[in-house]
Amino acid sequence: MVCRPGRMLLCCVVLALVLAPSRNGLNGAPVQEKLVGANFSHKTDSQGFRWDVQSSGYISDGTNDCFDSGLMLYVNGSQFSSSQRMMTADGREFVLSQAMGSLKLTRRILVDQARAVVRYLEVFENTSNRMQNVGVEVRTQVGGSARQILTSTGAPFTGALGKKDIGIVTVSSSTSRPCVMFLLTGRRTKNKPRVSVQGNRSFHVYYGLKLKPHETQTILHYVAQRRGMGPGNTPEVFKAFYKTRLVKPEIPGHLKRTLANFHVGAGLGTVAEAGAALRPMLAVLESLDVERSQHDMLVVDEEARLTGTAGCEGLEVETKYGRVKLKLAEAALLMGAAGVGRPMRVFLRNGEILAGKFDAPGLTLRTEAGMVVELAPERINALVLHARADDGKPPEGASAFLGLHPGDRLALAVDETALIEVATAWGTAKVPLAEVLFLGYQREPQPSQRLYLTDGSRISVVLKGVQSTLRTLRFGPVEAGPYVLAALSRISPAEKDDDEDEEEEKELTSKVAHCELTGDNLLVGTIDLPELRVIAATGVTTIDPKQVRTMERRDEEEGRFPAFTFELMKGGTLSGRLETRVLPIRCGTRLLRVPTRHLLAAHVPPPQEPEEDDKK
């Protein structure tokens, strides 16, 4: 049966939904949740640990008096006390709310029984027309003094989180009382908390937020009970605890972009590996709160969905670069104009995106009940096509994806001659496309365009005002200037999560000379000077840069001539100020001039010992 207006009441209702413009569901607005009154009975996770969440969100006892009071929230010095105590209909997540003047607070507490962890989302919404500074404090008192406090790296906690620390763990002094793990922050975020420990029993974690008018920010943190923790196994336990797949799935889509202390998908997660070719599309589906399945799905608005089988006589897209004829089977997602003239896009299964008005004669959705609904591209919100085993396989012969500001994302052909010109704080550079791992906008560590290179370098850059000619597989040469080029992402053979990206980066930089610079920049290269003049306590000492194993900035030192500690290849150390204001750093064929005050550290790996076979 084909459904047309006026055919029957049910069809009219369906068409009214299909043809109605979206209210806000496609812009990442929260889907209206079905909440019920909270039931605060205790829960037990998959490892047998007890969780007794109370009406204000704190944990009263846990397993064997693990907590006296765990995860109590204070905002600007006042204790959180919920006025609305709700939970999700499945009983997994508490949703507790309170208003403090023009600040709306919500604690979302998920007892993730399968992963044996409790996830906290502290949501702060500024309902006023003025900026607000918010002091956030989470207090925990465990049931007895811990024998030891460790950081997530397994080192003793000395009063502050280190650069690579993401949390702390208590090593219990009792065989019956569990250890407690606190995951407090992401690795690459700027908003790391301050942690205070009193008597190895009371833990105070402080975050500072600056909320713009009508802005929402969210603090994400986790707590888990574990047994047998110590310096030897803590890093590995935390690594599994922090895995992207643990952090990401259980956060409502509309809150992910509000996270203040985590950057979900940080690191090189934006690089388009073969398994990640569909990440831009998956980000859109996340904002729609939609998961792909074996069925096609019409997204009407934030609540209404129709599933079935889509079909059409043909699909054509009018892009800025030419008209493209496709089969519907090549598409993974159609974003229509939603009845309000919204820009239209077609997301392909191979990772490409074609922006422009599309025509799809005979576009229909046959529901599982056998009803056929006619669809008009200019009226629909989104049509999500079913998942297939070959999804995310880039086009044959593609080396990278080129993102363009009109919304297109095109596969690039292998081209050894293509260059990208960028400007850095230390000079300009022409970078071969073959050396680019990722180029694009990132929010962390500060909003900027970031360039990642295959040698391990990462740099904040600005595209120079020149046109680069890049050869696409679909349209041939395309001019990509600074106002058109949005992103470049190299296609790699396998997808890795954020932890593996960071481990790979560590392994790479441990083998090559590199310099760490302010702003989370890293240059693979060496200081290109015949000598370094160091002003030490005993006078001026001259050092051959090739004899320096490491030089590290002394954090307490500031000023025009910062002080460094030098570790020499042949042994021995030296401390003093560098006499020069600018350090030329040689990065392959490029020479960048870096102010000395921008340098945090320089590392040169020791010479490799020859293999036994080489000695013979």
Image (cartoon, grey):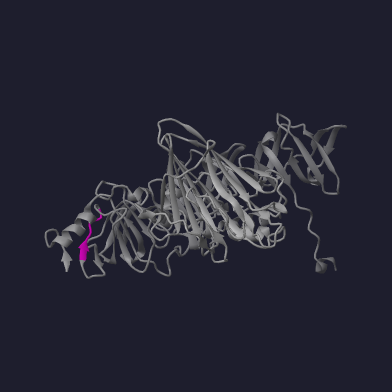
**Would you say residue 547 sits in the magenta stretch?**
no
Residue 230 can be seen, yes or no: yes
Q: Is residue 480 above or below residue 536?
A: below
Q: Which residue occupies the foreground of this view, 143 or 301?
A: 143
Q: What count of labels does the image hold?
A: 0
Quick one: quadrant of the C terminus?
Answer: bottom right
The N terminus: image quadrant: bottom left
Q: Is residue 565 left or right of residue 297?
A: right
Q: Nearer the viewer, residue 42 or 292?
A: 42
Q: Position of residue 606 (x, y in %)?
A: 78, 53
Residue 578 placement (x, y as % from top left):
77, 34
Of all residues, the one furthest to the right in this rendering is 538
Res 83 quadrant in image: top left
Q: Residue at x 79, y 46 (%)?
A: 546
Task: Please provide the residue range marked out in magenta.
Answer: 372-377
Residue 327 in view, yes or no: no
Farthest residue, direction left: 6
Question: Would you say 330 lies left or right of 276 here?
Answer: left
Residue 330 in percent (x, y) is at: 35, 64
Seen from the viewer's position, the closer of residues 48 and 482 is 48
Asked if 526 appears above or below 580 in the picture, the reply is below
Q: Position of residue 607 (x, y in %)?
A: 79, 55
Left or right: residue 18 versus residue 412 is left
